[in-house]
Amino acid sequence: MIVLIKKIPILFPILRQINRKRLSYKIKFYMFFDFFKKHLIPNALRSIVPSSLGLLYLRENFFLFQPNGGGTDNMLTPLHVKSINQTIPLLEKIAGHNNHEEKQIITSEQFRKLFFIKEIEANDSKLAALFTKYGSDKTKHEYHLIYSVILSVVKPKCLLEIGMGTNNEKVFSNMSKYGHPGASLRAFRDFLPSTEIYGADIDKEILFKEERINTFYVDQTNKDTLDKLAKNISNDIDIIIDDGLHAPNANLQTLMFALEQFNNKKNKWLIIEDIRIDSVVIFKLLTSLIDTSLYKTYIVRTKRSHVFVCHKYF
């Protein structure tokens, strides 16, 4: 007890130092707790004190994956993390045993060869030039090689892109302060002279209206905002592009939105961009859940990431 009392004065400069950091109060509390355990809790008691309050946060917020058994925190935590990382890949393997072949990843060149389109190179060059003109990074990722194919297969009356490329660095998944919000919307408008273009983003500050372009607020993690977005679009949507949050839950929410919009319609397309290699397994599992009598799915490896393409062909 005397040792603890002697150490208490060192808490105050540490508290001041942590408080200066630009972090949430919850994270600051976790940092203080770790320091408290390391410096103030006797060795004999450390085994019964959680290794980090952050791990309690993990348990509280990821209870879906928590092992349901007894044991110390030091036993539980690595098992909990392993459960989070292994569950989806194992579900994908199980799906493979249900007469579903594992979905193969194809290159953008292989994707293009599946469609016999003459003079596709002219579309490639035109689309690439427009993306570059307006400051979109789609050419850098070689996404124009995918879009030039799709836009040859379907002549959309209505195209929606979620994620407009905010340059607000306080918004997650931003394009840095050098970004050009709405760049790809303008490129698609110029490439498709008869198409109504719609954009949506979580950053209300970048919304705008131009010739044949209308933009609206959306939060991909909130279905209500997607439903409201649908009411603001008067035409049937032919193409939906997800270039927004780039998180699996947001992708799946957008997929559900697309399935609802495409119901009882044909020749509709969903494209999900910028998929991390670690998240590809989720989309492999997804392909085993989608009705193959109505949809054709592709996982395409591009220059810098992966793209999920879903075609409602019937």
Image (spheres, rainbow, N blue to C red):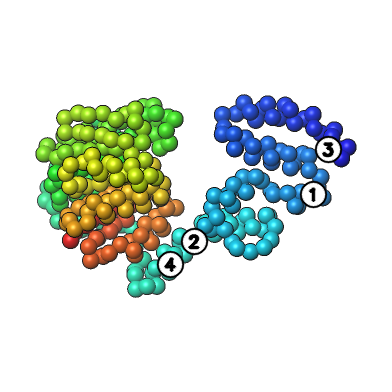
Location of mark 3 (residue): 4
Q: Are marks 1 and 3 in contact (CB under 8 Å)?
A: no
Q: Are marks 2 and 1 in contact (CB under 8 Å)?
A: no
User: From the viewer's perspective, is the residue at label 3 or at label 2 nearer?
Assistant: 3
**Whole-number angstrom distance, CA of label 2 to CA of label 1:** 34 Å
Q: Nearer the viewer, residue 5 or 93?
A: 5
Residue 186 figure quarter = top left
Name which of mark 3 and mark 4 comes first in the sequence. 3
**Whole-number angstrom distance, CA of label 4 to CA of label 2:** 10 Å
**Whole-number angstrom distance, CA of label 1 to CA of label 4:** 43 Å
| Residue 45 appears left or right of 111 | right
Q: How many marks?
A: 4
Residue 283 figure quarter = bottom left
Q: Are marks 4 and 2 in contact (CB under 8 Å)?
A: no
Say which residue appears at 22% left-offset and 56% top-offset.
263
Where disc 1 sits, the SS reads helix
Where disc 2 sits, the SS reads helix
